[in-house]
Image (spheres, coloured by chain):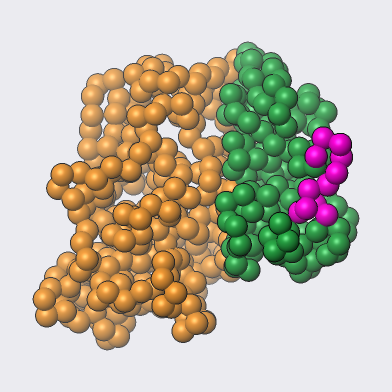
């Protein structure tokens, strides 16, 4: 059986017919064509698949597409301005060396975006906690934490 | 077999679906992750609870109890001032479940009914004499947490029953509680061992009510009566905390697995219980220990206390 779901993805209302057990990340990547969201561990450990659902970070590999029915989903593609101008947070990731291979970057950006939406001036501990569900195997995290701090300070 | 899925807005419709064999889906952070990890397939028939408003809310009862709806996620619980003030052990636990994303999605009802021997919220709930409020088409049933867990992943609920919420016993200003978890890392972690303690002090500062429960030390999370007796009538000082810890170590029936050997778990049971009791007593005396207590009781505790909650 398939279920029709309607999700607002990066501001666009989309309807898809999905199997009830299908995860959100596969719908985003294969049906919506939004391949910025990565599938890493596939069981909620690495955070590469993080997206915002109604503003809250969610591991989309372990979240059923049917759970997102009627909700707003924001992927990394939705962070930049429509003309492609990077968000201050994305720009800070570049200027602070918060990106190396890039695989974790979409998830990191999503978790940090959720943090900055809720905490005007986050402490270092709040920043670390916010990205605690996101693994990075390249940067050693320092550049990522610097970038989030910079984005918080300069907005 | 073909999978079915429904997402009703009323509890009655949910109970109908459960009566027809569907399994409830809350945040999915255990159910779906278990499926992705290959532990167990997703049930063929799912009923999504997400749209049932009646399953949300944190409500104070006339008797001073606190009712937490089954769909309340950990982030909401941690940020609730009533929970932080009167049930800090639960706030300690909810604040260290998974990651920020897990806490925003995972629900207290799911954490309880998953019935993991390592679940973080269950020991605090046991220590607050929590009652599981269950609903089915046959009506309502109230089951004390002490009778809810029958084995790893197994509860005493019957087919068609839904945990609609959890009622916590009244807790006042002379009551203090804490949950402390031994962990290899701060976040995205499961307890190696854990302990919760709740103590209430009389006017002379003596323990007149004590609850101690142990996590990841037996097939189910359970209270340890000998540890509670070791605290009653004492000042909840270092000697009493040590005695409670020894009682938990003696009662523990730990397993050896990738997280630790049975011997290590038993040794750490004493240490972690001691810290949980000491933290609960500090809070009962009006002292501030930051949430989560796990942070404050390891290493740099001096620098972490006194910053408020």
Q: Is residue B45 left or right of residue B281?
A: right
In this orientation, which residue lies closer to the viewer: A13 or B210? A13
* Residue B147 forms part of the magenta stretch: no
Q: What is the magenta range?
A: A81-91
Q: Is residue B107 above or below residue B85?
A: above
Q: Residue at x 41, y 45 (%)?
A: B108
Q: Residue at x 42, y 38 (%)?
A: B71
Dividing the image into 4 quarters, which one contains the C terminus of chain B? bottom left
State which chain is coloured orange: B
Residue B216 in sight here = yes
Q: Is residue B166 above or below residue B305?
A: above
User: Dominant secondary structure of the magenta stretch?
Assistant: loop
* Residue A90 forms part of the magenta stretch: yes
In this orientation, which residue lies closer to the viewer: B95 or B141? B95
Q: Residue at x 34, y 19 (%)?
A: B12
Q: Residue at x 68, y 53 (%)?
A: A112
Q: Colour of chain A?
A: green
* Residue B10 at x, y percent in the picture: 38, 20
* Residue B186 at x, y percent in the picture: 57, 66
- Numbered label tally: 0
Q: Is residue B38 above or below residue B51?
A: below
* Residue A49 at x, y percent in the picture: 72, 43
In this orientation, which residue lies closer to the viewer: B94 or B160? B94
């Amino acid at each position: 059986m398939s279920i029709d779901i309607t999700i607002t993805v990066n501001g666009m209302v989309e309807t898809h017919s999905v199997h009830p057990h299908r995860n959100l990340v596969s719908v985003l990547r294969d049906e919506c064509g939004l391949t910025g969201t990565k599938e890493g561990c596939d069981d909620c450990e690495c955070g590469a698949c993080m997206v915002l659902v109604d503003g809250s970070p969610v591991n989309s590999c372990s979240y059923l597409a049917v759970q997102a029915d009627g909700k707003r989903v924001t992927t990394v593609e939705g962070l930049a301005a429509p003309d492609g101008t990077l968000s201050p947070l994305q720009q800070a990731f570049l200027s602070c060396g918060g990106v190396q291979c890039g695989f974790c970057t979409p998830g990191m950006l999503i978790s940090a975006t959720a943090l900055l939406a809720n905490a005007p001036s986050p402490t270092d501990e709040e920043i670390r906690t916010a990205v605690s569900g996101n693994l990075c195997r390249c940067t050693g995290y320092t550049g990522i934490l610097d970038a989030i701090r910079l984005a918080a300070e300069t907005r | 077999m073909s999978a079915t899925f429904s997402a009703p807005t009323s509890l009655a419709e949910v109970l109908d679906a459960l009566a027809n064999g569907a399994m409830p889906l809350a945040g999915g952070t255990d159910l779906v992750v278990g499926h992705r990890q290959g532990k167990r397939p997703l049930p063929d028939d799912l009923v999504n609870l997400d749209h049932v408003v009646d399953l949300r809310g944190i409500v104070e009862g006339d008797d001073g109890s606190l009712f937490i709806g089954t769909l309340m996620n950990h982030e909401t619980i941690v940020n609730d001032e009533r929970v932080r003030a009167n049930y800090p052990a639960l706030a300690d636990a909810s604040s260290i479940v998974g990651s920020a994303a897990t806490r925003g999605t995972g629900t207290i009802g799911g954490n309880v009914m998953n019935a993991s021997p390592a679940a973080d919220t269950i020991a605090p709930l046991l220590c607050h004499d929590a009652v599981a409020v269950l609903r089915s088409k046959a009506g309502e049933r109230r089951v004390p947490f002490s009778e809810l867990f029958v084995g790893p992943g197994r509860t005493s609920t019957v087919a068609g029953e839904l945990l609609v919420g959890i009622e916590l016993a009244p807790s006042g200003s002379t009551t203090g509680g804490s949950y402390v978890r031994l962990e290899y890392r701060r976040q995205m972690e499961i307890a190696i061992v854990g302990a919760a303690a709740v103590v209430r002090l009389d006017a002379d500062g003596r323990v007149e009510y004590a609850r101690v429960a142990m996590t990841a030390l037996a097939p189910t999370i359970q209270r340890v009566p000998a540890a509670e007796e070791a605290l009653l009538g004492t000042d909840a000082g270092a000697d009493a905390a040590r005695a409670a810890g020894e009682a938990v170590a003696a009662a523990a029936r730990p397993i050896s697995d990738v997280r630790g050997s049975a011997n290590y778990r038993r040794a750490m049971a004493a240490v972690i219980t001691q810290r949980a009791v000491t933290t609960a007593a500090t809070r009962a005396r009006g002292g501030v220990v930051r949430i989560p207590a796990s942070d404050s009781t390891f290493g740099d505790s001096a620098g972490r206390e006194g910053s408020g909650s």
